[in-house]
């Protein structure tokens, strides 16, 4: 059964860890890649006021980062796939026009934070609905590639320098939007990376749903697993959620379990949807 969900959802992040005495928790209050730390990891705007995202260079050397917007769509297993400008639909084109941000390039000394201001342009002619772009923070290496011709005649040597980036969703909402969510078909699967708890997450309405999964056993107060930053976006009606588990947690999952989908604690922590099952 779908559970009605109307509350606006704001920043949070994603990840997973595990133990049974202490719950297996997947969490990250900030995204990090290379030496860049970004917080918050999710922005929701309604046009009434702007906000900011904080970048922090946690490395030992000065670094430069370029900030840009990308379009991405979630697929049926929860991955975000890039969308080219040519393939963008009207809503995706519109959100790129109305999101404003500055600066678009920053150079940070070690342990130096920098705020990126984010706001919206005119929204009067924008139809009600939820719009989304993804903000990319990408390191600009001092040398992206070095090519050297060797005197010994061994040919050309190419040194590739990895380029790190962090992406967070920028969600724009206009109007009174609603969404409903449901969980179904819990199961244990064997993936290429090992065992995992999987289930189907469904959505109805005109907004995304975002929160955390808690897996509990009957008679045990604390959840045995917590997975934060679980979303389903408006381009999908359903997706598969797959949560890796270790052998200890896999053994403990057998038998009756309750899987609950909750708002983030900072948004109230209310129950969005729930399913009970017996796992083998």
Image (cartoon, helix red, strand yellow):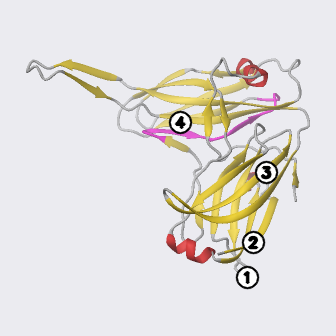
Q: Which residue is mark 4?
A: 166
| Distance Cα–Cα, label 2 vs label 1 | 15 Å
Which segment is the magenta one? Answer: 33-49
Question: As drawn, is 212 to the left or to the right of 105?
Answer: right
Q: Is residue 230 visible?
A: yes
Residue at 68 percent across and 67 percent down: it is: 215
Spatial CA distance of label 2 from label 4 is 36 Å
Q: CA distance from mark 4 to mark 1?
A: 40 Å
Circle 3: is it few (<14), some (14-19), or many (20+) Cα within 10 Å?
A: many
The answer for how far apart the CA atoms under marks 2 and 3 are is: 17 Å
Residue 213 placement: quadrant: bottom right
Task: Report x, y in % for residue 125.
Answer: 88, 17
**Mark 1 surroundings within 10 Å by alpha-carbon count, few (fewer than 14), some (14 through 19), many (20 or more):** few
Q: Residue furthest bottom?
A: 219
SS for callout 3: strand
* Quadrant, the N terminus: bottom right
Secondary structure at badge 2 equals strand
Percent position (x, y) of residue 153? 10, 19
Kind of element beneath mark 1: loop
Mark earlier in primary sequence (4, 3): 4
As measured in the structure, the alpha-carbon distance from the residue carrying label 3 to the one carrying label 1 is: 28 Å
Marks 4/3: CA distance?
A: 27 Å
Q: Which mark is residue 219?
A: 1
Residue 177 forms part of the magenta stretch: no
Residue 202 is marked as 3
Residue on which the image places disc 2: 277
Do the CB atoms of the residues marked 4 and 1 lie less than 8 Å apart? no
In the figure, 188 relative to 264: above or below?
below
Which circle's residue, 3 or 1, is located before the other in the chain? 3
């Amino acid at each position: 059964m779908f559970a009605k969900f109307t509350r606006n959802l704001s920043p949070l992040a994603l990840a997973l860890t595990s133990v049974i005495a202490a719950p297996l928790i997947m969490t990250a209050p900030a995204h990090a890649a290379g030496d860049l730390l970004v917080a918050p990891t999710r922005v929701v705007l309604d046009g009434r006021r702007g906000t900011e995202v904080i970048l922090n260079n946690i490395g030992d050397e000065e670094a430069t980062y370029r900030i840009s917007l990308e379009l991405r769509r979630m697929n049926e297993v929860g991955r975000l796939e890039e969308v080219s400008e040519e393939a963008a639909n009207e809503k995706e084109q519109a959100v790129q026009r109305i999101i404003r941000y500055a600066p678009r390039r920053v150079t940070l000394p070690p342990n130096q934070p920098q705020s990126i201001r984010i706001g919206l342009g005119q929204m009067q002619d924008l139809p009600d609905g939820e719009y989304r772009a993804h903000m990319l923070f990408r390191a600009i290496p001092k040398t992206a590639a070095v090519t050297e011709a060797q005197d010994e005649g061994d040919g050309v040597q190419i040194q590739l320098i990895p380029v790190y980036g962090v992406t967070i969703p920028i969600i724009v909402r206009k109007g009174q939007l609603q969404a409903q969510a449901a969980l179904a078909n819990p199961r244990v699967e064997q993936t290429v990376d090992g065992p995992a708890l999987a289930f189907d997450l469904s959505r109805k309405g005109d907004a995304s749903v975002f929160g955390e999964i808690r897996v509990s056993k009957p008679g045990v107060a604390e959840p045995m697993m917590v997975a934060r930053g679980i979303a389903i976006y408006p381009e999908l009606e359903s997706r598969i959620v797959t949560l890796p588990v270790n052998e200890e947690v896999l053994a403990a999952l057998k038998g009756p379990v309750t899987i609950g989908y909750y708002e983030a604690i900072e948004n109230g922590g209310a129950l969005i949807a729930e399913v009970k099952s017996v796992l083998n």
